[in-house]
Amino acid sequence: MLRVPAIRIEQPLGVFFAVSLRADFLLKVCYTIRTKFVNDTTEEYEHNKPKGMLQNLISLSKGSQREKDEDRVKEITRYTETVDAGFPNSIILGANYTEDGELISDPDSEDENDRIRWRVEQENGIFYLIIPTEQKLASIIDGQHRLFAFTESKNKDMELLCSVYLDLPMPYHAQIFATINMNQKKVDRNHIYQLFQFHLEQGESETWAPETLAVYFARVLSENKESPLYKKMRLGISDDNTTSISMASIIDGIMALITANPKDDRETLYSKKIGEGRTRELLQNKRSNSPLRDLYLTNKDRTIYDIIHNYFVAVDTTLWQDKSANYVFKRTLGVQALFDFLKEITKEKGIKFNYSIEFYEELLKPVSKINFEKDFFGIQTKLRSRLKSTLLLKSGLKTKEGIVNNYNETDLEYIINSLE
């Protein structure tokens, strides 16, 4: 029997108890009920089917959980093994139901099953959750991926916050799950990247993950008066509409030059504490086709910065001075296309090439003569790829044959004609 302190929380939907339980214990006592629509030919449907006009419009459903995403579980598993793993959000459980979704006996009965029911006792003003058995009697209402990630984790003894409902009817399980997942708002990525600034103050730069280094470069480019991106970037969530270049587009572009899997790199680095072996050498055996990867692994951060800085100096003197190009290349999709082009340049030239401002200007000058206000560049869903191909062709970095697989004949012909 397990007895743990609990906090009683009363809300309009009902009472639940906040408790701390170990992941390995939860894996023993919890299960999921997959969302299942009952076929209208089954006995269950015939017994419960809706009456009246709605009977042909409503399908009965049982359970609340979607299918488990194995890739997501593996990602979270890696995170559970990092030195600063944290799961402050609660796993929501509905206790006293079998895996068939049936409530375990009547709370007021004398049935033997009552002895295995989860219950709460109060002693000296303190609530305690009593879990008499390790039988699977708790349905996971929300948080299945977080919990199942510990199945293969080395940190199964981690304490997890749980919100436990006792005897909550099954239809409410689905209601809670739907409410949580339908009302979630995607967090602005500019804001997320701002949070990585915390890591700039943690340890030497050789311990920084690609995201942290990219955030650092973005901040320098934004705040250095000598930078072509000085005050041209939206930092985080802001009402300032004077610029349309998001910090996220800059950071994503920088990261693409040094990593193919930023999350995997970060989790590998964070498997070690600062001062106990966390360096970029931990990433040496990870395969990546990012063109500046070797510079990142060998801590040549200044070289990476100069490659990016010189490129945008040339962009500023060629494309950003032109009014028509100004409209395209100062928007997020245009900046993304510029980074796509830089990635192709560095793939072609390698890490030992002299990426001078003059070199970039020679590549970009022919592009500045193109009228980017043509209708061809007005389709947002195709703008990024069309800009990239135009940059590649007009600069001479690629030939028509080098991009032919990316377009249909009409688009390809239009690009070729627009270069003349």
Image: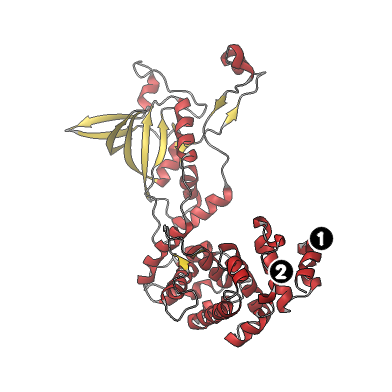
Query: Can you say whether 123 is above or below 385 in the image?
Result: above
Q: Name the quarter where the C terminus is drawn.
A: bottom right
Find the residue positioned furthest to the right: 409
x, y (%) of residue 34?
Answer: 55, 34
Query: Alpha-carbon neighbours of circle 1 within 10 Å: few (<14), some, or many (≥20)?
Result: few
Give the secondary structure at mark 2: helix
Residue with the mark numbered 2: 389
Closest to the camera, between mark 1 and mark 2, is 1
**Left or right of residue 193, residue 38 in this image:** right
Q: Amino acid at mark 2?
A: Ser
Query: Alpha-carbon neighbours of circle 2 within 10 Å: few (<14), some, or many (≥20)?
Result: many
| Visible residue check, residue 288 | no
Front residue of 105/42: it is 42
Q: Quadrant of residue 285?
A: bottom right
Q: Amino acid at mark 1?
A: Thr
Find the residue positioned furthest to the left: 124
x, y (%) of residue 47?
Answer: 58, 13
The dot on residue 90 is: none
Front residue of 199/264: it is 199
Q: Name the quarter where the N terminus is drawn.
A: top left
Front residue of 238/345: it is 238
| Visible residue check, residue 102 | yes
Query: Can you say whether 106 is above or below 117 in the image?
Result: above
Give the secondary structure at mark 1: helix
x, y (%) of residue 392?
Answer: 71, 73
- CA gap between label 1 and label 2 equals 14 Å
Sequence-first disc among 1 and 2: 2
x, y (%) of residue 362?
Answer: 66, 84
Numbered disc total: 2
Residue with the mark numbered 1: 410
What residue is at 45 percent from the left and 40 percent from the top? 28
